[in-house]
Image (tube, coloured by chain):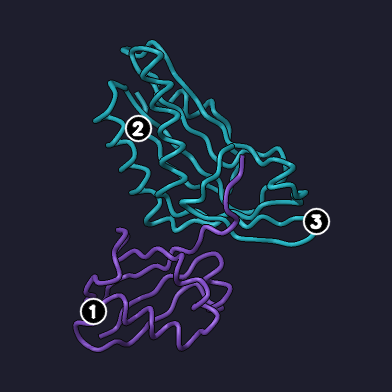
Amino acid sequence: MKVRVRCFAAVREIVGVGELIVDLPEGAALIQLISQLGSQFPRLQALTGSLLFSVNREYASTDKRLAEGDEVALIPPVSGGTDV
Amino acid sequence: MGEPMFEITDQPLSLEPLVNAVKRSSSGAVATFLGVVREQTRGRQVRYLEYEAYREMAIPKMREIVEEIHQKWKVDEVAMMHRIGHLQVGEASVAIAVSAPHRHEALAACAYAIDRLKEIVPIWKKEVWTDGEEWVGPGTCEHH
């Protein structure tokens, strides 16, 4: 199945494009997509601990099952820490 | 009566259109918030900021914040606008207006709106300093 991945900010700069179509095994969970992207773009791995994810424009946890045509976004950190 | 206003724009922001959009005959107060680009951040000199949004998710998240507000306070209307693109020091990045029958509700809801916006609305800024750059996004513990 194919899902659409939207990339923003630091993630977009690492991936090099704002949008990817990724082929996944049927019934795969979000975590599998993240791991697949991590192998394809090793620099993403440094970020994945702090990334949030959305599926079809709702925040989602990594065990969320994906379906054909889903729109996934990697919501990047949140670098920079605190400010006053 | 205007329509509730939720926008992401690359044009300069001002509060007046938002104030006009939220005013109702029941309103006794309109509270506003304007976030502006500061010259110094975390001790570094800002050259400019570059804002980017996941627009298709950001607008529904703004609406969700307004639903939350209506559950917490008796307010009339809420309007929110966020600017994206290249912003210079002193320019406004985000504008919020909340109307309510009474001032306490308007002020509390306006403070809540900007805090929640920074938590859940997927908009990022790249801070470009005189000596480097960094992306900052939703959930950052940041206070203007």
Query: What amino acid is found at the position of numbered circle 1 in the picture?
Result: Glu
Do the residues under discs 3 and 1 have CB atoms within 8 angstroms? no
Rendering coords of residue A62 (x, y %): 30, 70
Q: Is residue A75 left or right of residue A29?
A: right
Q: Nearer the viewer, residue A24 or A39?
A: A39
Rendering coords of residue B28 (x, y %): 38, 10
- 3D distance between C-alphas at marks 1 and 2: 36 Å
- Label 3 belongs to which residue? B130
Which of the 4 image quarters holds residue B91? top right
Within 10 angstroms of label 2, few (less than 14), some, or many (20 or more) residues?
Answer: few
SS at circle 2 = loop
SS at circle 3 = loop
Query: On screen, B82 above or below B136?
Result: above
SS at circle 1 = loop
Q: Is residue B41 left or right of residue B31?
A: right
Query: On screen, A32 above or below B82?
Result: below
The subunit carrying tag 3 is B
Query: What amino acid is found at the position of numbered circle 3 in the picture?
Result: Thr
Rendering coords of residue B35 (x, y %): 58, 36
**Colour of chain B in the rendered structure image:** cyan
- Label 2 belongs to which residue? B3
- Label 1 belongs to which residue? A68
- 3D distance between C-alphas at marks 3 and 1: 45 Å
Q: Nearer the viewer, mark 1 or mark 2?
A: 1
The subunit carrying tag 2 is B
Same subunit, labels 3 and 2: the answer reads yes
Output the letter for the chain in purple. A
